[in-house]
Amino acid sequence: MKNFDMIFVHPPRNFEYLLSNIKVRSAYVMMPMGLLGLCDLLYRKGFSAKIINYPLEKILDLKFSLIKELKNVNFKVLGVDLHWVLHSAGGLDILRLVKKYFPNCFTLMGGYSATYFADEILSDHKYIDGIIQGDAEEPLVSLLKNLDSLDKVPNLIYRDENGKIVNNKITYVAQELDSLNFAKVKYLDHWKEYINYNYEIMHFPWPVEMARGCIYNCVNCGGSSHSCKIISKRNNVVFRAPERVVDDLKDLMEVSDVKGIFYGHGLYPKTEDYFLEIQRLIREEKLDIHADLEIWRLPLSKKYARDFARTYNLEKSLLWFSVRSFSESYRKKYHEYFGNFDDAFNFSNKEIQELIDTTRLYDIPFRLFWDVGNPYETGLDLLFNVFTALKILVKNISKKDKVSMWSEPINISPGCPVELYSENFGVNMFVKSFKDYVELNRKSKMLLPPMDVTVNYRTNYLTRTGINLMNKAMTLINLISVITG
C-alpha cells in the first residue's frame, strides 16, 4: 500500500443534496487555489501528499467511496479545506466519517472560515483534532514534523490528550508567495477531469493565485482589509512576482489544454502596472489564452484596456465590474454613510458609461454585476436600480454591444464588516454562529442556483422575502442580457 503523510479532501457542500447537486454549480467542485500550493510544498519538504476532490469523484463515479479509497493507503493526517463556509456541513461529515473508520489518524481543518470559527468548531466537534488558522504553509510542514509535540506548531488550535483545547495563536503570516507553485496539478486525483468539470459546471476558467490580502473594505467581503487583520492577522497585501504568475500558466499549459484563466486579485489603479507586466510576459511567451478579470475600482485606463485586448483571446475573455446598485442616488447615500470605511460605491453613472465606452472601443466583452439588499437600500432605491438596469439593457441590445449584466443573491460572508457590525449597517443576520451556517447548508437544496438561493439576512428597509423575490425577478433581466450581450 502507498504511504502518505497527508491527504487533503475537498468536501462537498453537503451530503443531504449531494446527488441532486451533481453536475450543477452547487456541487462546488472548485477547490481553493492554495491546496495545490500546499501539496507541492510538502513534497519539496520531503513529505508525501495528495488531494482527493470528493464532489469530483462522485461526478465521475456515483459509487465512489472515500472510506474504501482510504483503506487502500496508509496516512497520518487527513485535512479538509473550509475556505468557503458553504462547505461547512460537508466538511464536518467527511471528518466525522474518517475519524470513525480511522481513529488513529489526525483529523485537520484549515481555511478562512475554519479560522474564523475555530474555537466553536473544536468545542462542538470532538472528532476534529486540530485547525490550522490563517496561512498554512509553514504550520503544515511543522505539524507533520511535530505530531507528537503539537505545542511547537504555529497557528494550530488543537485538542490535547486530555481533551483540553489549546490555541498556539497565529504567529505565521506569509510575507512571500514566490516560493510556492499553484499549478502542479499532478497531486490531485483525476486532475484532467477537474479542469474540464470546473469550467463546465462552475463556469470558471482556471483560478490564478496572485496575492493575499486586500487594501479595500467591501462590506460584504470576508477578505476585506479589516477582516484580514481580524481573521488571519494579515496587515498587508503580498503579491507574487509577475514572472511567477506566468510560470504557473506555462506549467499548466504544458500538461493540459487549459486556455482560460481567472485572476484571483482585481484591477485598480495601484495594480495596473502589475497586470501590464504580467500581460507583457504572456505575449513574450506567446501563450494563447483568454482571461477573466474583475475591475475593483475605477477608472479603467484606455492604456490598460488596449493592452488587455492585444494580450488575450477576446472571444471568451471578460472584464467585469460590480456597480452594486445602478441607482446613483443610492450610491451617493451609501457613500455619505460609509464612504470613510468603504469607497466601493463612490462613482457616477457617467463613469459607468465611460467604462462601457472604453471596453467597446477595444471590443472587450464586459459584464456589470449588480445586486439588491445593500445597507439602507429602500424600495424606491430598488426601483431606480431596476429601471436604470433596463435602460442599459435596451441600449446595449440596440447597439449590439458585448455588454451584459449579472446578479446573484448577496452572501454576507463570515467575518465581513457587515457580519461583524451588522447593527451599524442596519442589517439583521439570520445566521451568526458556525452551527447556524451548518444548519442553513443542510437545508439548502440549491437545485437551480441562483434562482433558489435564499439570503441570510434582512435589512431595516427590506425583508428577507422581499430581497429573495427581487433576486428572482432580476434573473430574467440577467438572462436576456447575457444572451444578447
Image: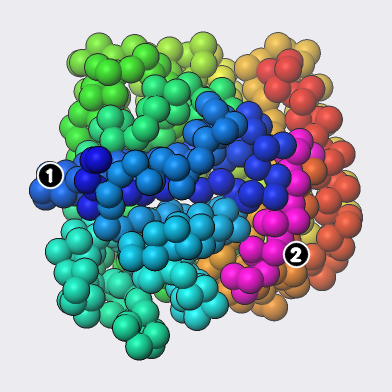
Q: Is residue 450 magenta?
A: yes
How many marks overall?
Answer: 2
Up-down relation of residue 479 to residue 426 (above or below) = above
- Foreground: 469 or 98? 98
Which residue is painted at 88% across and 48% down in the image? 469
Q: Horizontal placement of 20 versus 9: left or right?
A: right
Up-down relation of residue 370 to residue 80 (above or below) = above
Mark 1 = which residue? 44
Up-down relation of residue 127 to residue 202 (above or below) = below
Which residue is painted at 57% across and 53% down in the image? 90
Q: Over which residues does the magenta segment extend? A: 433-451
Q: Nearer the viewer, mark 1 or mark 2?
A: 1
Q: Secondary structure at mark 2?
A: strand
Residue 383 appears in the picture as rendered: yes
Q: Is residue 298 magenta?
A: no
> What number is the disc on residue 457?
2
Color encoding of the figure: rainbow
**Place of residue 232 in the rendered image (x, y in percent of width and height, measured from the top left):** 37, 67
Answer with mark 1 or mark 2, whichever residue precedes in sequence: 1
**Place of residue 377 in the rendered image (x, y in percent of width and height, measured from the top left):** 78, 59
Which amino acid lies under the numbered mark 2 shown in the image of this protein? Answer: Tyr
* Quadrant occupied by the N terminus: top left
Residue 226 appears in the picture as rendered: no
Occupied quadrant, residue 376: bottom right
